[in-house]
Image (spheres, rainbow, N blue to C red):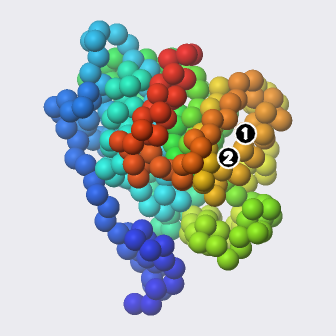
Amino acid sequence: MPIVAEAPDYIRVFSDGSVKRFDHLTAPPSNVSINGFKSKDFTIDHSKPITARIYLPDTPKPDNCLPVLVYFHGGGFCVGSTTWLGYHHFLGGLSFESQSIVLSIDYRLAPENRLPAAYDDCYSSLEWLSHHAKFEPWLERADLSHVFLSGDSAGGNIVHQTTLRAVRSQVNLVLIKGLMPIHPYFGSQNRTNLEKSNLESFDVSMNDFFWNLSLPEGSNRDYFGCNFEKEVVTAEEWQQFPAVVIYVAGLDFLKERGVMYFEFLKRNGVKDVKLVEAEGETHVYHVYRPLSEAAKVLQKQMSEFINSI
Protein backbone atom coordinates (compact mmCIF):
# COMPACT_ATOMS: atom_id res chain seq x y z
CA MET A 1 0.00 0.00 0.00
CA PRO A 2 1.52 3.39 -0.98
CA ILE A 3 2.61 5.65 1.89
CA VAL A 4 1.18 9.18 1.65
CA ALA A 5 2.60 10.68 4.85
CA GLU A 6 5.16 9.64 7.43
CA ALA A 7 6.94 10.82 10.56
CA PRO A 8 9.84 8.35 10.89
CA ASP A 9 9.59 6.06 13.93
CA TYR A 10 6.22 7.51 14.92
CA ILE A 11 3.43 7.25 12.35
CA ARG A 12 2.81 6.19 8.76
CA VAL A 13 -0.34 7.01 6.76
CA PHE A 14 -1.31 4.95 3.71
CA SER A 15 -3.27 5.88 0.61
CA ASP A 16 -6.37 3.99 1.78
CA GLY A 17 -6.45 6.12 4.95
CA SER A 18 -5.13 3.40 7.24
CA VAL A 19 -2.54 4.32 9.84
CA LYS A 20 0.40 2.50 11.39
CA ARG A 21 1.82 3.82 14.67
CA PHE A 22 5.21 2.52 15.70
CA ASP A 23 5.65 0.88 19.07
CA HIS A 24 7.45 2.72 21.87
CA LEU A 25 8.66 1.51 25.21
CA THR A 26 5.77 1.39 27.67
CA ALA A 27 5.38 0.80 31.39
CA PRO A 28 2.60 -1.22 33.02
CA PRO A 29 0.69 0.21 35.98
CA SER A 30 1.57 -1.06 39.44
CA ASN A 31 -0.69 -1.39 42.47
CA VAL A 32 2.47 -1.74 44.53
CA SER A 33 4.37 1.46 45.30
CA ILE A 34 7.60 1.84 43.29
CA ASN A 35 9.82 4.91 43.62
CA GLY A 36 7.25 6.63 45.81
CA PHE A 37 4.10 6.12 43.75
CA LYS A 38 1.66 3.53 42.51
CA SER A 39 -0.50 3.62 39.39
CA LYS A 40 -3.68 2.20 37.92
CA ASP A 41 -5.39 2.36 34.51
CA PHE A 42 -9.03 3.39 34.09
CA THR A 43 -11.51 3.68 31.24
CA ILE A 44 -13.25 7.04 31.12
CA ASP A 45 -15.46 6.35 28.09
CA HIS A 46 -15.73 2.86 26.58
CA SER A 47 -17.46 4.13 23.43
CA LYS A 48 -14.64 6.30 22.10
CA PRO A 49 -12.49 5.05 23.94
CA ILE A 50 -10.91 7.46 26.42
CA THR A 51 -8.60 5.95 29.02
CA ALA A 52 -6.43 7.28 31.81
CA ARG A 53 -3.68 6.35 34.22
CA ILE A 54 -3.84 7.58 37.81
CA TYR A 55 -0.66 8.09 39.81
CA LEU A 56 -1.02 8.09 43.58
CA PRO A 57 1.92 9.18 45.75
CA ASP A 58 3.19 7.72 48.98
CA THR A 59 2.33 10.35 51.59
CA PRO A 60 3.51 10.97 55.15
CA LYS A 61 -0.05 11.83 56.18
CA PRO A 62 -2.36 9.24 54.59
CA ASP A 63 -5.57 11.08 55.52
CA ASN A 64 -4.74 14.42 53.89
CA CYS A 65 -6.59 15.59 50.80
CA LEU A 66 -4.36 15.95 47.75
CA PRO A 67 -4.43 18.38 44.80
CA VAL A 68 -5.17 16.85 41.40
CA LEU A 69 -3.08 17.37 38.28
CA VAL A 70 -4.79 16.41 35.01
CA TYR A 71 -2.16 15.79 32.31
CA PHE A 72 -2.52 15.63 28.52
CA HIS A 73 0.32 13.97 26.60
CA GLY A 74 1.92 15.38 23.47
CA GLY A 75 2.52 13.91 20.03
CA GLY A 76 1.09 16.37 17.52
CA PHE A 77 -2.43 15.07 18.31
CA CYS A 78 -1.48 11.96 16.31
CA VAL A 79 0.77 9.81 18.51
CA GLY A 80 1.62 9.37 22.18
CA SER A 81 0.21 7.62 25.22
CA THR A 82 0.26 7.95 28.97
CA THR A 83 1.65 4.39 28.99
CA TRP A 84 4.89 5.50 27.30
CA LEU A 85 7.83 4.87 29.59
CA GLY A 86 8.91 8.53 29.68
CA TYR A 87 5.49 9.76 30.76
CA HIS A 88 5.13 7.01 33.35
CA HIS A 89 8.41 7.87 35.06
CA PHE A 90 8.01 11.64 34.83
CA LEU A 91 4.39 11.80 35.99
CA GLY A 92 4.87 9.23 38.73
CA GLY A 93 7.85 11.18 40.00
CA LEU A 94 5.89 14.42 39.76
CA SER A 95 3.06 12.86 41.76
CA PHE A 96 5.47 12.02 44.58
CA GLU A 97 7.41 15.32 44.42
CA SER A 98 4.25 17.46 44.43
CA GLN A 99 2.21 15.19 46.70
CA SER A 100 -0.63 15.27 44.21
CA ILE A 101 -2.85 12.80 42.41
CA VAL A 102 -1.98 12.79 38.69
CA LEU A 103 -4.68 11.83 36.18
CA SER A 104 -3.04 11.31 32.78
CA ILE A 105 -5.40 11.11 29.80
CA ASP A 106 -5.25 9.03 26.62
CA TYR A 107 -7.52 10.83 24.16
CA ARG A 108 -8.51 9.86 20.61
CA LEU A 109 -5.81 10.53 18.02
CA ALA A 110 -5.77 12.06 14.54
CA PRO A 111 -5.98 11.53 11.63
CA GLU A 112 -8.71 8.98 12.44
CA ASN A 113 -10.17 11.48 14.91
CA ARG A 114 -9.31 15.01 13.88
CA LEU A 115 -9.69 18.06 16.07
CA PRO A 116 -11.74 18.93 18.02
CA ALA A 117 -11.95 15.26 19.13
CA ALA A 118 -8.97 15.62 21.48
CA TYR A 119 -10.51 18.73 23.03
CA ASP A 120 -13.85 16.95 23.51
CA ASP A 121 -12.17 13.95 25.15
CA CYS A 122 -10.01 15.97 27.51
CA TYR A 123 -12.88 18.12 28.67
CA SER A 124 -14.81 14.88 29.23
CA SER A 125 -12.03 13.78 31.55
CA LEU A 126 -12.88 16.69 33.88
CA GLU A 127 -16.51 15.61 33.88
CA TRP A 128 -15.43 12.04 34.70
CA LEU A 129 -13.18 13.29 37.50
CA SER A 130 -15.98 15.33 39.07
CA HIS A 131 -18.45 12.43 38.90
CA HIS A 132 -16.16 9.63 40.06
CA ALA A 133 -14.10 11.24 42.80
CA LYS A 134 -16.65 10.31 45.47
CA PHE A 135 -16.91 6.67 44.42
CA GLU A 136 -13.46 5.64 43.19
CA PRO A 137 -11.09 4.60 46.02
CA TRP A 138 -8.07 5.88 44.08
CA LEU A 139 -9.67 9.34 44.07
CA GLU A 140 -11.11 9.41 47.58
CA ARG A 141 -8.45 11.90 48.71
CA ALA A 142 -8.77 14.11 45.62
CA ASP A 143 -9.30 17.79 46.42
CA LEU A 144 -11.45 18.99 43.51
CA SER A 145 -11.07 22.57 44.69
CA HIS A 146 -7.37 22.35 43.81
CA VAL A 147 -7.17 21.03 40.26
CA PHE A 148 -4.35 21.83 37.85
CA LEU A 149 -4.06 21.19 34.11
CA SER A 150 -0.79 20.42 32.38
CA GLY A 151 0.47 18.83 29.19
CA ASP A 152 3.37 18.95 26.79
CA SER A 153 3.47 20.03 23.14
CA ALA A 154 0.00 19.21 21.74
CA GLY A 155 -1.03 18.57 25.33
CA GLY A 156 -0.08 22.15 26.19
CA ASN A 157 -2.41 23.28 23.41
CA ILE A 158 -5.15 21.07 24.89
CA VAL A 159 -4.67 22.73 28.28
CA HIS A 160 -5.64 26.08 26.74
CA GLN A 161 -8.72 24.74 24.96
CA THR A 162 -9.93 22.65 27.90
CA THR A 163 -9.64 25.67 30.19
CA LEU A 164 -11.70 27.86 27.85
CA ARG A 165 -14.41 25.20 27.74
CA ALA A 166 -14.41 24.96 31.51
CA VAL A 167 -14.66 28.75 31.85
CA ARG A 168 -17.54 28.87 29.39
CA SER A 169 -19.48 25.92 30.75
CA GLN A 170 -20.45 27.81 33.93
CA VAL A 171 -20.69 24.38 35.56
CA ASN A 172 -18.45 23.96 38.57
CA LEU A 173 -17.19 20.50 37.72
CA VAL A 174 -13.89 21.15 39.44
CA LEU A 175 -12.03 24.29 40.46
CA ILE A 176 -9.05 24.78 38.13
CA LYS A 177 -6.45 26.69 40.13
CA GLY A 178 -3.58 26.75 37.66
CA LEU A 179 -2.26 25.77 34.24
CA MET A 180 1.18 24.47 33.30
CA PRO A 181 1.57 24.08 29.53
CA ILE A 182 4.98 22.61 28.67
CA HIS A 183 6.49 23.50 25.26
CA PRO A 184 2.99 24.19 23.85
CA TYR A 185 2.26 23.39 20.20
CA PHE A 186 0.56 26.27 18.39
CA GLY A 187 0.76 27.65 14.86
CA SER A 188 -0.69 30.06 12.33
CA GLN A 189 -1.09 30.43 8.61
CA ASN A 190 1.43 33.28 8.66
CA ARG A 191 4.93 32.02 9.33
CA THR A 192 7.01 33.47 12.15
CA ASN A 193 10.42 34.91 11.35
CA LEU A 194 12.09 31.78 12.69
CA GLU A 195 9.91 29.56 10.53
CA LYS A 196 10.53 31.70 7.44
CA SER A 197 14.27 31.38 7.90
CA ASN A 198 14.02 27.60 8.29
CA LEU A 199 11.40 26.65 5.70
CA GLU A 200 13.34 23.60 4.51
CA SER A 201 14.13 22.38 8.01
CA PHE A 202 12.94 19.17 9.63
CA ASP A 203 11.24 21.18 12.40
CA VAL A 204 9.01 23.12 10.01
CA SER A 205 8.19 20.06 7.93
CA MET A 206 7.21 18.04 11.01
CA ASN A 207 5.10 20.88 12.40
CA ASP A 208 3.24 21.12 9.09
CA PHE A 209 2.97 17.32 8.89
CA PHE A 210 1.18 16.99 12.23
CA TRP A 211 -1.08 19.99 11.64
CA ASN A 212 -2.09 18.57 8.23
CA LEU A 213 -3.08 15.30 9.88
CA SER A 214 -4.88 16.78 12.88
CA LEU A 215 -6.76 19.85 11.65
CA PRO A 216 -10.41 19.43 10.59
CA GLU A 217 -10.86 18.74 6.89
CA GLY A 218 -10.95 22.04 5.02
CA SER A 219 -9.24 24.01 7.80
CA ASN A 220 -5.86 25.68 7.71
CA ARG A 221 -3.45 26.76 10.43
CA ASP A 222 -5.71 29.68 11.35
CA TYR A 223 -8.16 27.19 12.86
CA PHE A 224 -8.86 28.38 16.40
CA GLY A 225 -7.23 25.32 17.91
CA CYS A 226 -3.98 26.04 16.10
CA ASN A 227 -3.88 29.84 16.10
CA PHE A 228 -4.93 31.05 19.56
CA GLU A 229 -5.40 34.60 18.26
CA LYS A 230 -8.30 33.52 16.03
CA GLU A 231 -10.64 32.46 18.80
CA VAL A 232 -13.03 35.07 20.17
CA VAL A 233 -12.64 35.25 23.94
CA THR A 234 -14.46 37.90 25.96
CA ALA A 235 -12.81 40.11 28.57
CA GLU A 236 -14.98 38.43 31.21
CA GLU A 237 -13.70 35.00 30.17
CA TRP A 238 -10.09 36.17 30.34
CA GLN A 239 -10.74 37.46 33.85
CA GLN A 240 -11.74 33.93 34.88
CA PHE A 241 -8.61 32.36 33.41
CA PRO A 242 -6.53 30.66 36.13
CA ALA A 243 -2.88 31.35 36.95
CA VAL A 244 -0.53 30.11 34.22
CA VAL A 245 3.11 29.06 34.12
CA ILE A 246 4.36 28.39 30.58
CA TYR A 247 7.47 26.23 30.34
CA VAL A 248 9.73 26.58 27.30
CA ALA A 249 13.04 24.96 26.37
CA GLY A 250 15.96 27.04 25.14
CA LEU A 251 16.80 24.81 22.16
CA ASP A 252 13.20 24.01 21.23
CA PHE A 253 11.99 25.19 17.81
CA LEU A 254 8.59 25.80 19.46
CA LYS A 255 10.03 28.12 22.09
CA GLU A 256 9.07 31.08 19.90
CA ARG A 257 5.42 30.01 19.92
CA GLY A 258 5.52 29.52 23.68
CA VAL A 259 6.81 33.06 24.19
CA MET A 260 4.11 34.36 21.82
CA TYR A 261 1.48 32.56 23.88
CA PHE A 262 2.86 34.10 27.08
CA GLU A 263 2.71 37.59 25.56
CA PHE A 264 -0.80 36.92 24.22
CA LEU A 265 -2.13 35.97 27.66
CA LYS A 266 -0.53 39.04 29.25
CA ARG A 267 -2.02 41.30 26.56
CA ASN A 268 -5.46 39.91 27.27
CA GLY A 269 -5.32 40.59 30.98
CA VAL A 270 -4.70 37.16 32.45
CA LYS A 271 -3.88 38.15 36.00
CA ASP A 272 -1.07 35.73 36.81
CA VAL A 273 1.09 34.42 33.96
CA LYS A 274 4.77 33.50 34.06
CA LEU A 275 7.32 32.17 31.58
CA VAL A 276 10.00 29.69 32.70
CA GLU A 277 12.84 28.64 30.38
CA ALA A 278 15.00 25.53 30.63
CA GLU A 279 18.20 26.77 29.04
CA GLY A 280 20.07 24.35 26.82
CA GLU A 281 17.19 21.86 26.68
CA THR A 282 15.22 20.51 23.71
CA HIS A 283 11.55 19.82 23.00
CA VAL A 284 9.87 17.57 25.61
CA TYR A 285 13.20 16.62 27.16
CA HIS A 286 11.33 15.50 30.29
CA VAL A 287 9.66 12.72 28.28
CA TYR A 288 12.81 11.52 26.52
CA ARG A 289 14.94 11.84 29.69
CA PRO A 290 12.47 11.60 32.59
CA LEU A 291 15.13 10.72 35.16
CA SER A 292 17.54 13.50 34.17
CA GLU A 293 18.48 16.39 36.43
CA ALA A 294 16.65 18.75 34.06
CA ALA A 295 13.46 16.71 34.42
CA LYS A 296 13.84 16.74 38.20
CA VAL A 297 14.17 20.53 38.13
CA LEU A 298 10.95 20.74 36.11
CA GLN A 299 9.18 18.48 38.60
CA LYS A 300 10.34 20.72 41.43
CA GLN A 301 9.21 23.89 39.62
CA MET A 302 5.78 22.41 38.90
CA SER A 303 5.46 21.14 42.47
CA GLU A 304 6.24 24.57 43.88
CA PHE A 305 3.52 26.10 41.69
CA ILE A 306 0.96 23.47 42.71
CA ASN A 307 1.67 23.98 46.40
CA SER A 308 1.78 27.79 46.21
CA ILE A 309 -1.91 28.24 45.39
**Most extreme residue toward the left, as rendered?**
32
- Relative to 56, say whether 225 is above or below: below
**Most extreme residue toward the front, as rendered?**
280
Q: In the drawing, does residue 36 fall left or right of residue 184?
A: left
Secondary structure type for disc 2 = helix
Q: Residue at x 62, y 48 (%)?
A: 250
Q: In the drawing, does residue 72 fall left or right of residue 133?
A: right
Quarter of the image with the C terminus in it: top right
Q: Residue at x 59, y 32 (%)?
A: 179
Looking at the rendering, which quadrant does residue 54 occupy?
top left
Q: Residue at x 60, y 54 (%)?
A: 252
- Relative to 286, say whether 275 is above or below: above
Secondary structure type for disc 1 = helix
Residue 193 drawn at (x, y percent): 80, 62
Q: Amino acid at mark 2?
A: Gly
Q: Characterize the local packing of mark 2: few (<14), some (14-19) or many (20 or more) Cα atoms within 10 angstroms.
A: many
Asked if marks 2 and 1 touch (Cβ < 8 Å), the reply is yes
Q: In the drawing, does residue 31 fall left or right of residue 291?
A: left
Check disc 2 and report the residue beneath it: 258
Q: Amino acid at mark 1?
A: Phe
Check disc 1 and report the residue beneath it: 262
User: Foreground residue, 16 or 143?
Assistant: 143
Quarter of the image with the N terminus in it: bottom left
